[in-house]
Amino acid sequence: MSTLKTKRRKRGDGSLKGQLLVAMPLMTDRRFARSVIYLCAHSEDGAMGLIINHRADHISFPDLLERLGIVPHGAEDGISNDILERQVHVGGPVETGRGFVLHTSDYHSEESTLPIDHDVSLTASIEILKAMASGEGPTHAMLALGYAGWSAGQLESEIQANGWLHCPPDLNLLFDPDLEAKYTRALAKIGVDPSHLVSDAGHA
């Protein structure tokens, strides 16, 4: 995978939008165990993010394209290997039937793309899937079903209770297809060895 440049930006409003959340090893909620979450939104009203390292084993990307009518049944021959090999992710436990595409900002739709920072955007429409199937989509993208959501003050409370660590984004990590390695790599970005973690923790 080509190296992607990442701009590390500090936010003065306390928002973790565009940051990675990394679950502590003692996370008691099994839905988020060893999860790495990219935060797409974070304000005093709450937060929303996508888990980037949990695979949806019940459906493949070509199957999803077929179900949505983007690619006819049995028409995989016309799709690039890159598309055929893409994974579908479990983005979180909320609205699991809804799809979200996290992608590099070289793709943009005026109607449906939400820029998160200079490098990453979020699009939740069928048009981006059509563009990806035809080879006209973003350079890097991941499709997730469902999302993780927090009500006002909930995420802050969970961080205070040592449920999460957080760190700046890493685009290579974000779009790497090796999902199993993402958790350890995210902790390494913070300078943490998971074998040394106990119930208390600091923040990057």
Image (tube, grey):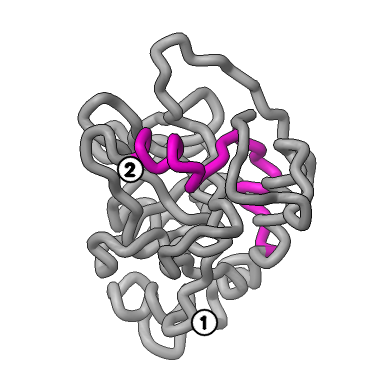
Magenta stretch, residue numbers: 155-178
From this viewpoint, is residue 187 visible? yes
Measured as percent of width and height from the top left, residue 47 is found at: 31, 38
**From the viewer's perspective, is 5 left or right of 139?**
right
| Quarter of the view holding residue 119 | top right
Residue at horizontal 66 percent and vertical 62 percent from the top:
177
Of tags 1 and 2, the one toward the viewer is: 2
- What is the residue that sits farthest to the top in this orientation? 12
The kind of residue tagged 1 is Glu
Question: Above or below — where is 119 with respect to 11?
Answer: below
> Sequence order check: which comes first, mark 1 or mark 2?
2
SS category of the residue bearing label 1: helix
Q: Are marks 1 and 2 in contact (CB under 8 Å)?
A: no
**Screen quadrant of the C terminus:** top right
Residue 17 place in picture, x, y as percent: 43, 29
Residue named by callout 2 = 48
Report the side of 139 relative to 18 (left or right).
Answer: right
The image position of residue 38, as x and y in percent, is 49, 44
Which element carries disc 2, helix, strand or loop? strand
Horizontal arrangement in the rendering, residue 39 relative to residue 8 (left or right): left
